[in-house]
Amino acid sequence: MIIIKSFYTGPLSVNCYVATDEATKKTFMVDPGGHNVDMVNYIKNNHLDLEYIILTHGHGDHMGGVPDMRKEFPKAKLIGCIHEKAMLEDPNLNMSNMVYGYPIAFSADRYVTDGETLKIGELELKFLHTPGHTPGGMCILVGDTVFSGDTLFEQSIGRTDFPGSSFPAIINSIREKLFTLPDDTKVLPGHMSPTTIGFEKENNPFV
């Protein structure tokens, strides 16, 4: 069973998710936009074993907390999509200066590709490459839950007016990678409220 706790992080209030395999306490974190004391205390006080920090994409508001989280949890390995490597390593591309006022750049410990899987405790994660908001944007599917980053929101989609963004690409990603999931799949986005695939198929005006 998966236990998921959400925290607002960073100056743009990104949803950062801490997801734990209840049986083993093996844990992963999705998109730390900044340092959050409550989030750090939640992990430490519950003796969770944070194995991975996973980025849905490389924009500064979603990755700005990585340096602090690596200091707090030095065992945790960082995962990103292989197509986002250039953005993570270049502050001009990830726009961290705009978000934080100073550059942030780093390399992931592991870069993954579309369809690749990862076991964390008894959980199996599947990485779905969903370009459009960024070239290397990806979603993370775990059972009946998908962490959608800035690809799919409640009745909205990620912005496509950034360098490297593409409206046709994000629509294609949503239709081919997300709307093919079961309707009851829970969608946990990078901003705004949770939703479901079925609700978005019926109500999202962009797709």
Image (cartoon, rainbow, N blue to C red):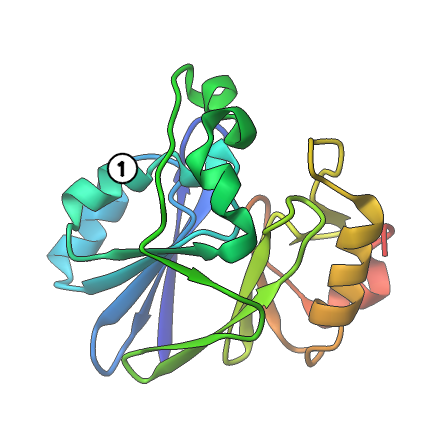
Using residue 56 as the reference point, say whether residue 30 is left or right of it: left
Residue at coordinates 33% horizontally, 37% vertically from top-left?
A: 65
Q: Secondary structure at mark 1?
A: helix
Residue at coordinates 46% horizontally, 27% vertically from top-left?
A: 91
Residue at coordinates 48% horizontally, 47% vertically from top-left?
A: 85
Amino acid marked by disc 1: Pro
Question: Quarter-wise, where is residue 104 in the image?
Answer: top left
- Indicate the position of residue 53 as horizontal and vertical percent values: 33, 55
Mark 1 — residue?
67
Q: Answer whether residue 153 is visible to the viewer in this image.
A: no
- For the C terminus, the quadrant is bottom right
Q: Answer whether residue 154 is visible to the viewer in this image.
A: yes
Q: Residues within 10 Å of mark 1 (few under 14, many from 20)?
A: some
- Indicate the position of residue 84 as horizontal and vertical percent values: 53, 48
- Indicate the position of residue 150 as horizontal and vertical percent values: 61, 47
Residue at coordinates 75% horizontally, 66% vertically from top-left?
A: 199
Using residue 46 as the reference point, say whether residue 175 is left or right of it: right
Instruction: Note whether 110 is above or below 103 in the view shown.
Output: below
- For the N terminus, the quadrant is bottom left
Total numbered badges shown on the rendered structure: 1
Instruction: Note whether 123 is above or below 153 in the view shown.
Output: below
Instruction: Note whether 43 is above or below 19 in the view shown.
Output: above
- Indicate the position of residue 124 as horizontal and vertical percent values: 41, 80
Using residue 117 as the reference point, say whether residue 76 is left or right of it: left
Instruction: Note whether 202 is above or below 189 in the view shown.
Output: below
